[in-house]
Image (cartoon, rainbow, N blue to C red):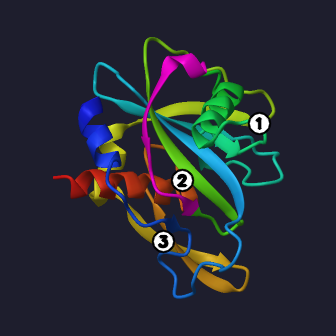
Amino acid sequence: MTPDALRGALAREEAATSDFDLDDRAAPSGADGRAAAVLIAVQDHPGGARILLTKRASHLKHHPGQIALPGGKIEPMDAGPEAAALREAWEEVGLPPGAVRVVGRLSAHRTVTNFTIVPIVGLIEGAFTPRPEVGEVEEVFSVPLSHVLSPANYRVEERDWRGAVRRFYTVPYGPHYIWGATARILRGLADRVASCG
């Protein structure tokens, strides 16, 4: 997929998504939740473009060992979601902000943990060797963009969560179990690209 094609897919307005999309219960009403941003960083490789993902450290209090996109809370010092996503990617995996060309964003995503996440899509320009943040990131790896852009690679699974059955997307790749908000955000990207034909 070319940068122009990706930019064209992101130019369309789409409804916000949430971790509740597959459940009977509705997303919480009222406040939008804590503002956050993540970076879907796309990098060219000889075998095709890939996106950057992290495995969170297993000792963390929140979401230990889960697969995530680089990102976090939008801080007062950030100029907006794009700045927050780039700052977090620098802190978590050592990706210099100047090495990323932002091409657009997806609609906001509401999580069960009361975050409203803005996914930012950017292209990594030039060579880049990840540097995981000690203590927060256990592993940095990449997945083919073609894998996450194919709706056929997604499954819907379920588990008990706080006394109720929760249904969610997964998009496993090799030994990595990508699920929850990360899989839902990536599925949103896949749907956006597929709708552009």
Any magenta on residue 98? yes
Q: Nearer the viewer, residue 88 or 169?
A: 88
Tags 3 and 1 in contact by the CB under 8 Å rule? no
Q: Nearer the viewer, residue 86 or 13?
A: 13
Residue 50 appears at what percent x and percent y? 39, 32
Residue 106 appears at what percent x and percent y? 45, 51
Region in magenta: 96-109
Number of numbered tags placed on the structure image: 3
Query: Which circle, 3 or 2, is nearer the viewer?
Result: 2
- Is 7 on the left-hand or right-hand side of 132? left
Residue 171 appears at what percent x and percent y? 43, 55
What's under tag 1, amino acid-wise? Glu
Q: Which residue in the structure is indicated by mark 3?
A: 157
- Is 78 on the left-hand or right-hand side of 120? right
What's under tag 2, amino acid-wise? Thr
Query: Farthest residue in the top direction?
Result: 127
Any magenta on residue 39? no
Q: Is residue 56 above or below residue 4?
A: below
Residue at point 36%, 58% (across, down): 13
Q: Nearer the viewer, residue 111 or 131?
A: 111
Judged from the image, the secondary structure of the residue bearing numbered disc 2 is helix
Which of disc 2 and disc 3 is earlier in sequence? 3
Which of disc 1 and disc 3 is earlier in sequence? 1
- Is 67 on the left-hand or right-hand side of 46? right
Q: Nearer the viewer, residue 70 or 17?
A: 17
Residue 118 appears at what percent x and percent y? 56, 51
Residue at point 48%, 75% (across, down): 21
Rendered image: mark on residue 136: 1
Judged from the image, the secondary structure of the residue bearing numbered disc 3 is strand
Q: Which residue in the structure is indicated by mark 2?
A: 182
